[in-house]
Structure formats: structure tokens, C-alpha cells
Image (spheres, rainbow, N blue to C red):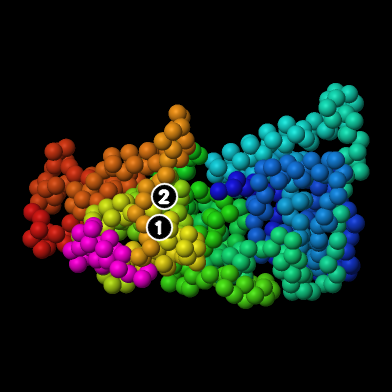
Amino acid sequence: MAEVVNLDALIQREDFIAPSDDSTGAGEGGKSSCSTTDLTRGESFYETLRKPDFQRETAAWTPSAVCDFIEAFVNLDLIPAVICWQSPARLTFIIDGAHRLSAIIAWILDDYGAGARSVQFYGKVPSEQEATHEKTRKLVNKRVRSYQEWRHETGNPGSIPEIGQRVRALAHAKIPLLWVPGTDATKAEKAFFTINQSAVEIDATELKILNARSKPNAVAARTIVRNATGTKYWQSFSPDGQKAVVETGRAVYAALYRPPLEKPPRSEELPVAGHGYGYQTLPLIFDLVNIANRLPVEDATQNKKKYLTPQGHAVPEEEPTIRVIKETARLVRRITGTNAASLGLHPGVYFYSPNIRHQPTAVLAVAYFLMHLESVDGFIEFTQHRAAFEDFLLNHKMYINQLTVRHGSMAKGYDHIFDYYLFVYEQICKGSTEGQVESALAKSDKYQTLVKERPVLSRKAKAFSQDAKNVKLLSDVLDRSFICNLCKARIDKKAMQLDHIDDKSLGGVADLDNGQWAHPFCNSTYKEYLRANGLLK
């Protein structure tokens, strides 16, 4: 996964239809270019800068891309114009070019996602974002030098010889500006979509989310992804509504992304949703929200034009948004955590390839599988067969990779992996052995091309590759996992509970010899089922 620099905090968002009592001069345009002075906080032009509330996050450039652009700027290279629109409130909305302006602002502020401005905006930045900030900062300071050093050389000529010959040119460094005419916000929004279909197109999935930006599922997804920090999409809600959204969003974020996924992986605790920071993060959570709420999960690439229609401004609705985010939390509690409904699914079994690459498509497939089990009241039966089902998944992990390659990732392929889960699960429920399940797959038109294989690792290299280390780590983690004493399947440490073998209600005491590890669901609902059917003391 490519590292991306989060510059989203550097230019604030605003409703396209910001109120104004005087629209005189709106839509007429403005200055033809902007300099570092114009992009400095406190300067009049900077203080008018806004991003439309519907615009995607400014988090798509790699550290090298940010550095390349800053270097091009100070070298007076040709830079594409930033396209703006002046609203009736005399705000400067960026229609195209937010990354370009934000990169220079980042250089000025020394903030590549974890500086003072970003910390103020987010409250607390994810560790991955902080690491990328440091990497970008070091790269820029090595190749370009910091803006503070350029300013110091300006006032103290000769103090930094490496930039002394170029520092005067900075006064002439400009980013050209072009302006969308007119005062109609809908036309300006249409211009945004039109312009962003040329050069670097907006990804179809991004369009899908932008199109739904004011709807409960999109607001819930953005709240979760940003740990209820940053842009407050819920700010129009009542105080109680805001509290509900923030608290639920943070709880879901913690359940999905804690502890953070290390690079390279070193911990046996793996987060359900992988990296909490990256280009796949919002699309994954958006579709997870849709699955939790039984909303359509659409492959946007099949009908991209559908999402190119400007939507205009809409205020998010409080009650539906709260309902949607709470339903998402309910599904996530089923996957992980210590809630009594939690199955405590081990991420290493379900959500990671053999070399610990996170599989977001599998997250959606598992979520859909659990929603299916809920619809047929099937969690007791699943628990009865869970150990055998998970053993088969582990012994055939490469099947998920093959299905994803064949059908596509995320919305394109999750339902195919769900079908595979259901096929295997139904075979196991019928009492089939692993070999018999393999035979049934081989006879199926859908699955006959699946090949049982192991990751290909070099047998000649003297040093272990990172892939080899990852495969060994996951193998050992799974081999040494705690086992639920009730269903015999592996337990994720974040969900394990110490259960009384002889129940407290029957006189059992908190003696270590009377303790056993169990999944929360097994420790509650399944245990009661076993006792009610005479299968447990």
C-alpha cells in the first residue's frame, strides 16, 4: 500500500452555499496567482481559502510527490493552474488543485499531517499518519530545506549557502489561478466533477462516496474513519446527537483499528480493518456501514456516470445518521471486542493473507456472512462448527487471494468470497471432512480452478526476506493462539474472557482451576444453550 500524506487539515471545508448578505462581485474571479505570502496563515487570501464540503480528502500524494511539487515551486518550474470559484460569501473555493496549494502550505507550516495545525484539527493523529509526516518532513528538508531556513537566509544572506543563490527567486514563485465564472453553486459543483474527470480522474468509488456525502452512511463512514476528529460532518445535530455520533464513531474506530498495524508487523495482535490510514480506508468503512445497515454495496465502476450528477447542498439528518452508525457498531461488536454478542473472530484467521497483508475484501465478506447468519438465527450452529470451518480457511488461505484476483477487490469481489464461505460452511455443517470439502470445491464450476498452495519463499537466500518473516510470524501466532474451551476455535486476545467452568450461579468459585478461556458469545449465549440441552453441567 502506497504511503500517502494527509494534508486535509491545512485548508478548511465549507458549505458551498455559505450565507452572505452581499453577493456583489461574487463569481467574478480574483488574483491571477498566489505566492508563499498569500498562503501564510493570517494573510487575507489564505483566510478566504476553502474546500467544498463534498470534496474528497486531501490525502492522495506520496511523500515524494509532495517533495517533488515543493521543489518544482521553488525552482520556478511550470505549475498547472489551480481552479477556484468565488462564492457569494466571497470565499475562495478550490475546484481543482487542493493538493498543490496544500503542499506549499504544508511546507510553510512544517506540517505534513502531524504538525501543529493537523494536531489542532484532529486532536490526535494516527501513528501511521505521524510516521508519514516525519518521513515527508525529512525528505523535504533534505532536498529543498525547510521554509524556515529559506526565510532565515532571506534575512541573513549567506547563512545557508546551499540555498543562497535561489532564495531571491522565491519572491517570484507563484501558483497560477483560474476562476470559474458565475454565482451558481450547482454549476460550480458541476465544474468540479467535470474538471476532475480529466488528467487524474476521480476514482469511481470516491465518486460514489462524494455522491452520498450528506447521507447517513457517508457521514457515519467519515466519522468512523477519522475517529470523530477533523471535519465535523455532524455539527448541525443537537448536542445529544453530536455526542452519540462522536462516542459511537470512536468506539467503532478503536474496535477496528486498535492496536495499530505495525510496518513491518511485529505484534501478534492484528487490527480487524488493517491500516487506519490509506486510500482504501474510507471505501472499506463506507461499504462496511452499508452491509451493517443492509444497504446496497455498489460496484461504482459499473455505472460511473450515475455519480457525476451534482447533488447540491444537503444538511445531514440526525436520527437516520445515529441509527446507521449504531447499527454499524452492533455489527462490529459481533466481530470483535468483549460484548456478550462478540464472536471474537481472530483477525489472523479471517482478515490477513499468509504474509500478513490485510485483505479488506475479506472484511466485507465476513461482515456479509455474519449478517446472513443473523438473518437465519444461525450463530449457535456456526459456533458448533466454527473450529472445523476456521481450520479449513487457514489450511486454504490462498483461496481468498485467488478469488480476489479473479473477481476484484472490495465491492467487486466481496460477494464471491461470501459465496465461497457459505459453500464451505454448508459442507462442514453436513459433516464433510476437509478432504471431502476439497472434493466438493473441485466439482463446482465456481471453484474447480482453486489451487491449494503455500506462499512461494526463496530457498536460496541467506537472509530471511520480510515476506518470510511475516509468514513465520502469522504461522506462530496462530499456532500459539488461545483456544476457546467451549467451541475449540481460536480466540482473538482483544475478545478473550476468563469463564467459570463451574458457573458462579451453581456455586463455582474464582479459583484458577475453575477458569477457562472463552469467546464472549460462547461464555454467554452458547454456554446457556449447552446447559439447556444437557450438554454441560
- Outermost residue to the front: 460
Which residue is tagged 1?
400
- Quadrant (top left/top right/bottom left/bottom right) for the C terminus: bottom left
Identify whether 386 is placed above or below 499.
below
Residue 228 in view, yes or no: no
Can you give x and y, in whole percent of width and height, for residue 376 in the image? 28, 72
Question: Image quadrant of residue 31?
Answer: bottom right
Q: Magenta part of the protein: which range?
A: 424-446
- Marks 1/2: CA–CA distance: 8 Å
Residue to which mark 2 is pinned: 353
**Amino acid beneath label 1:** Ile
Image point 91% across, 38% down: which residue? 169
Give me the disc on residue 184. Answer: none
Q: Is residue 308 magenta?
A: no
Instruction: Give neighbour class at mark 1: few <14, some 14-19, many 20+ (Cα, 10 Å).
Output: many
Q: Between 215 and 176, which is closer to the camera in this rendering?
A: 176
Residue 126 to residue 19: above or below: above
- The structure residue drawn at horizontal position 77% and vertical position 35%, both measured from the top left corner, is 144
